[in-house]
Image (tube, rainbow, N blue to C red):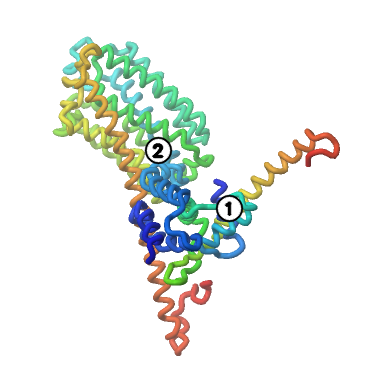
Amino acid sequence: MRESAFLVLTALADEPRHGYAVIQEVHRISDGQVRLQAGTLYGVLERLRNAGLIEVDREEVVQSRLRRYYRITALGATRLAEETERLRKRANLAAARLRKLAPEGGVA
Amino acid sequence: MNSLERRYRSLLALYPADHRAIYQEEMVGVLMDGTSPGQRYPRLGEAANLISAAVWRRLGGAAGSLTDPGWRPAAAVFGLLGSLLMMARETYSIVEHLFPPPWIHQMVGPGEQSVLGPHFWFAVSYAVLWLVPVAAMIVGWQRLAAVVASGLVAWSGWGYVWIIGKSAAVDPPSSLVWLTIEITTVAALWVPAESRSVRRQLGWRRIGLLLGAGALLSILGYVEHLQGNYRVLPVAGIRFSSWSLPLAVIAVGFIGYVVFRLEDRSRRRVLAFIAPALVQLVVIGYDVFGISEGWRLQPSIADISGEDMGVRGWGEISVLLLVPLVAFAIAIVAVRQRERSLRLAKLGRERERETATAQSAPSTRDGGDPTLRSPDDGQAT
């Protein structure tokens, strides 16, 4: 799973969000490192939707503009959990090796 | 609509119509939400991102759709089918050497058919080696199947170039179709599938049908030899005896049954894998471009020596090689378009259901029959 897809799924994991809210949430959870552009975001949303990992929650019209809220599906939550576990294992492995590498009181 | 929104819309116009129909209004909202006060033009990075995403969506969509997981099970099934066809072809060739069909003397002249010559032993070795990918795909050792099949294709590809160069008495047009089957089979075998994907999708009964089809195709040569008479099909110049054609039809029927019993997404993709060889067969058989001039051992490519290939010779081969590539590209786009239409139709039906549910809710509250409500009513968020 690509990082952008992982971040979008994470942004939708706690509550349904519309497109601009997803951009803001991804920016926040990535500590300001990732700011999705609209073209990238809708490429990711389309792929996730086609794969059944997210779905439309509801639509609203705000200031004459369509606002579509997306929510994560059960399959999406499962995939996100699997990916999180995979990343956690890698991070734990890296941390363990860094502990061996570092002198006492050093890294990690 | 202000000038900035108009400019965003002109950038979004680069997307394909189906994407715009679903996402354009939403994307305009997102883009306008992200604007700064007084902004009159899209930001450079934003514009570049929209243009590249739109171009990728248009041009890369077909290639991108190859990476979707739906191709994996289909590739595994086609990997088995292609390997089986290759093994059947080589076995047919062995049988043909041992029991020559009635037309063989007419084609190569009496005494020219060497029964146990190098061609025979090549066929034996190929048949045995193609058995490896067949067995490996059934057992679930896909990597082994891919490696062995790749070696066989590399070897036969080299042999094909050598034959063209030597102007040997073979039938390069039909060999090209087999080369296409070999290449698509190898490509399919390298697509990573889940373990034991073939057995899970087909089950032993349908695997048995495929093996039966392979066996029937393999023994056609013997049936033709036994009958001793033959006719020529008005198309493609295919020769057959009164028993071999029905047997071939039964074998194709078995394969067709197995393919059409696949899950929809897999079936469409298996047909896309079949398309290159099938279209090439039609192009050559019907001599669509006026270059193959018949089916077997006719003038044209087969009779052009390596030195005299010239522009026409290489042009013929280029067209015949390009045909399967174009056919595959069209098949991929067709699969994508079909699934997009189905998805849109499904979305439309869902929307109609939601609208009907919303309209029926007030009447239910007003005393409508509560038993008519769908179980999903009231669960929407």
Q: Chain of mark 1?
A: A
Q: Nearer the viewer, residue A104 or B84?
A: A104
Q: Residue at x 69, y 44 (%)?
A: A89
Using the image, tell me which numbered label, if any, was put on residue B78: 2
Above or below for B191 versus B88: below
On the picture, is A98 further left or further right than A44? right
Horizontal and vertical percent position of residue B244 = 24, 32
Above or below for A96 versus B145: below
Crowding near pointer 1: few (<14 within 10 Å), some, many (20+)? many
Using the image, tell me which numbered label, if any, was put on residue A7: 1
Residue B284 visible in the current orientation = yes
Q: In this view, which residue lies farthest toward the right?
A: A104
Q: In this view, which residue lies farthest toward the front?
A: B38
Q: Residue at x 43, y 55 (%)?
A: B42
Horizontal and vertical percent position of residue A38 = 47, 55
Q: In this view, which residue lies farthest toward the left?
A: B234
Q: In this view, which residue lies farthest toward the bottom?
A: B367
Q: Nearer the viewer, residue B216 or B54?
A: B54
